[in-house]
């Protein structure tokens, strides 16, 4: 079999004689644009577009002018066109400068936009915003908000008083301070200590009793002994601090407030309390906790010669009560009289 190296397309492009082609019985329409392969040699070339009949395209401006000319204007539009045509443009040279009508080459179009600077204070601003939202307490009822803050004032007042009296005792000269003498400051300090501890025990008991009221109201469903236990344990912890020394009582109450805040947070998460109660308790617990810490700092600065509650109890126990001391004094006086009477009787003899 003989093979020819010429391309098959080249062989097919050789036109056959017209006599050899059968006449078609129908008329074939040739499209204006068709692909035709032309060869200058036996080597294959890229197909090219055949020479099509040039289509005379009208410019867009001519089409628009014709469409606008064909469109009829209303009387109002004609008046507006006439007004705009006769309107005088007022010059404003004060707004024109050498750069007002120019565009710099290396401006925001000619050059890349610079990257935005990273806000280094974004995290701090977010934290400040979070703190503001927390302390705003917008969802808390106004009555509970004001009464709760008012309830922390006695605790805060006793803490500030303890710090001030400690400062007076440390800076007193010859037994006299700026306002109180050393004796009066020590006496007031002995009165403030039981007031602060007793008030803290009352507040802690009250916070536990709130859950009893929520259980009776059926808020979040009836939970039974789980909720009642909160109102029982809180007073037990609170009133046991009255039997402790001052420092131990304050530390125990601080731990009690923090533990009860955790319990209230879990109760809010479970739907046993209103949604705002956890944030409300956080603010109040923070104020009370700061007051306790302030009191402990003030008591740590007390002079060594100022007796504490334990020392005063020991002295009272050793000396006995006032009735016992009065009875001993009367017995000693009676014994002295008897001894004097015996001496007189002996002198007469």
Image (cartoon, rainbow, N blue to C red):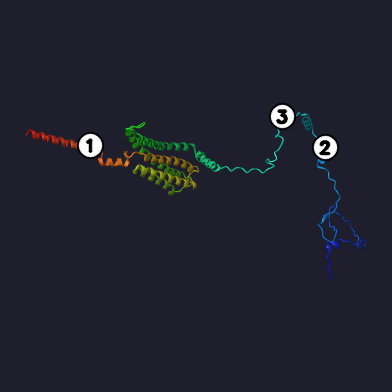
Q: Sequence-wise, which precedes: disc 1 or disc 2?
A: 2
Q: Quadrant of residue 65?
A: top right
Residue at image coords 44%, 36% = 150
Q: Which mark is residue 342?
A: none
Alpha-carbon span between mark 3 and mark 1: 109 Å
Q: Sequence-wise, which precedes: disc 3 or disc 2?
A: 2
Q: Position of residue 313 (x, y in %)?
A: 30, 41
Q: In this rendering, would 19 be left or right of 295?
A: right
Q: Position of residue 76 (x, y in %)?
A: 78, 31
- Residue under numbered circle 3: 93
Q: Secondary structure at mark 2?
A: helix
Mark 3–mark 1 contact, CB under 8 Å?
A: no
- Residue under numbered circle 2: 69
Q: In this rendering, would 25 be left or right of 75?
A: right
Mark 1–mark 2 contact, CB under 8 Å?
A: no
Q: Which mark is residue 326?
A: 1
Q: Quadrant of residue 211?
A: top left
Alpha-carbon span between mark 1 and mark 2: 128 Å
Disc 2 packing (10 Å; few <14; some 14–19; many ≥20): few
Q: Position of residue 163 (x, y in %)?
A: 39, 37
């Amino acid at each position: 079999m003989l093979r020819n190296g010429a391309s098959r397309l080249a062989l097919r492009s050789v036109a056959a004689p017209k006599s050899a082609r059968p006449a078609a019985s129908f008329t074939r329409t040739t499209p204006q644009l068709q692909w035709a392969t032309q060869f200058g040699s036996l080597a294959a070339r890229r197909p090219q577009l055949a020479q099509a009949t040039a289509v005379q395209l009208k410019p867009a401006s001519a089409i628009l002018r014709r469409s606008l000319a064909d469109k009829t204007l209303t009387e109002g539009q004609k008046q507006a066109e006439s007004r705009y045509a006769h309107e005088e443009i007022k010059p404003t040279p004060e707004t024109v400068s050498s750069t007002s009508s120019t565009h710099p080459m290396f401006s925001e179009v000619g050059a890349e936009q610079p990257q935005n600077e990273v806000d280094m204070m974004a995290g701090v601003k977010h934290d400040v915003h979070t703190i503001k939202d927390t302390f705003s307490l917008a969802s808390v009822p106004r009555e509970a908000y004001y009464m709760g803050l008012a309830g922390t004032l006695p605790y805060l007042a006793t803490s500030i008083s303890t710090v001030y009296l400690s400062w007076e005792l440390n800076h007193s000269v010859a037994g006299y301070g700026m306002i109180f003498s050393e004796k009066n400051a020590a006496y007031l300090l002995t009165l403030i200590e039981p007031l602060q501890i007793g008030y803290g025990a009352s507040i802690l008991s009250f916070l536990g009793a709130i859950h009893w009221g929520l259980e009776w109201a059926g808020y979040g469903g009836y939970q039974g002994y789980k909720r009642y236990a909160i109102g029982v344990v809180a007073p037990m912890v609170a009133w046991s601090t009255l039997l402790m020394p001052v420092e131990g009582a304050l530390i125990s109450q601080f731990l009690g407030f923090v533990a009860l805040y955790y319990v209230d947070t879990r109760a809010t998460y479970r739907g046993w309390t209103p949604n705002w109660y956890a944030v409300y308790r956080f603010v109040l617990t923070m104020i009370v906790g700061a007051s306790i810490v302030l009191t402990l700092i003030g008591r740590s600065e007390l002079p060594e010669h100022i007796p504490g509650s334990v020392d005063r109890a020991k002295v009272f126990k050793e000396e006995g009560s006032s009735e016992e001391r009065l009875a001993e004094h009367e017995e000693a006086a009676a014994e002295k009289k008897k001894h004097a009477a015996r001496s007189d009787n002996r002198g007469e003899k």
